């Protein structure tokens, strides 16, 4: 209960400072904070119980049982007690690891190396994909994830040629000495993070891998129908407070 209390306090602290979105989507923040409050209330309530009350099941534990019944009860309770002890120790070790990590490690976004390692696992499972497949959608609010879905699934690429974009992401290397604008897209939490990449026609040596940039430009279709971003300006920026798309 003490470990759960610490995790709840850390969760509330991250929620109040706006850093909980480094781990979960904004839509889930209220649920995590509400669960933390419930856990804290349960911890406070547990302190009002008399010591040993958790093992009192309301039975009358008299001493009028025969000795053979007592031995059978003890034999049956022994395996249960062993399993309960093993479960308690295992849960305690895992919870302790989570608590130590929460207290020692500073809140941080997922690394560029992880984003690069996940690139190419799946083509386009990002927000807005359902709209894109129905035809040319309103692209004015598209982020890197939405455009990644367009680049991967559009059959009439000429329909997107000339669309203006204003995108934020970090630089990663692409094939043939190219450059990608990259962003991590999460649905619920960082565990399900997927990498969205867009080819951008800029000099591969102009920015270091992992540098965050703001790209203004237009979408262009190559002669073979492939789409890329032709930037009019690429400005280096600091990592945004919310580094993910949803």
Image (tube, rainbow, N blue to C red):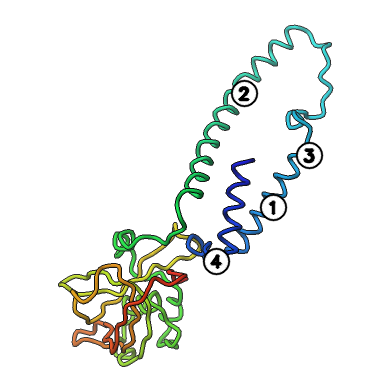
Residue displayed at 83% across by 16% down: 62
Residue displayed at 59% across by 58% down: 13
The answer to which of marks 4 and 2 sits earlier in the sequence is 4
Measured as percent of width and height from the top left, residue 110 is found at: 39, 60
Position of 41 with respect to 111 (left or right) is right
Closer-to-camera residue (6/162): 6
In the displayed structure, would residue 39 be above or below residue 160?
above
The answer to which of marks 3 and 4 sits earlier in the sequence is 4
Q: Secondary structure at mark 1?
A: helix
Q: For the residues marked 2 and 3, what is the alpha-carbon distance in whole angstroms?
A: 25 Å
Mark linked to residue 163: none
Quarter-of-image position of residue 197: bottom left
For marks 3 and 1, give the one nearer the viewer: 3
Q: For the residues marked 3 and 4, what is the alpha-carbon distance in whole angstroms?
A: 33 Å
Instruction: Name the residue carrying label 2.
Output: 81
Label 1 CA crowd tier, 10 Å (few <14, some 14–19, many 20+): few
The answer to which of marks 4 and 1 sits earlier in the sequence is 4
Instruction: Name the residue carrying label 1.
Output: 38
Q: Are marks 3 and 1 in contact (CB under 8 Å)?
A: no
The N terminus sits in image quarter: top right
Q: For the residues marked 4 and 1, what is the alpha-carbon distance in whole angstroms?
A: 20 Å
For marks 1 and 2, give the one nearer the viewer: 1
């Amino acid at each position: 209960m003490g470990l759960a209390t610490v995790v709840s306090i850390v969760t509330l602290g991250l929620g109040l400072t706006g850093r909980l979105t480094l781990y979960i989507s904004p839509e889930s923040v209220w649920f995590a904070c509400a669960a933390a409050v419930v856990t804290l209330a349960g911890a406070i309530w547990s302190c009002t119980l008399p010591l040993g009350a958790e093992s009192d099941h309301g039975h009358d534990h008299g001493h009028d049982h025969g000795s053979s019944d007592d031995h059978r009860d003890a034999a049956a309770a022994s395996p249960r007690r062993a399993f309960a002890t093993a479960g308690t120790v295992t849960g305690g070790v895992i919870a302790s690891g989570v608590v130590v990590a929460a207290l020692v490690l500073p809140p941080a976004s997922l690394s560029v190396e992880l984003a690069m390692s996940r690139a190419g696992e799946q083509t386009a499972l990002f927000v807005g994909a359902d709209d894109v497949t129905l035809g040319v959608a309103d692209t004015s609010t598209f982020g890197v994830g939405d455009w990644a879905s367009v680049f991967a699934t559009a059959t009439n690429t000429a329909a997107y040629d000339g669309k203006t974009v204003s995108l934020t992401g970090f630089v990663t290397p692409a094939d043939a000495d190219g450059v990608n604008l990259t962003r991590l897209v999460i649905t619920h939490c960082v565990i399900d993070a997927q990498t969205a990449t867009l080819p951008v026609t800029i000099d591969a040596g102009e920015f270091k891998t992992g540098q965050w940039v703001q790209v203004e430009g237009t979408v262009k279709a190559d002669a073979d129908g492939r789409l890329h971003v032709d930037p009019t300006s690429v400005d280096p920026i600091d990592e945004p407070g919310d580094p993910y798309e949803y």
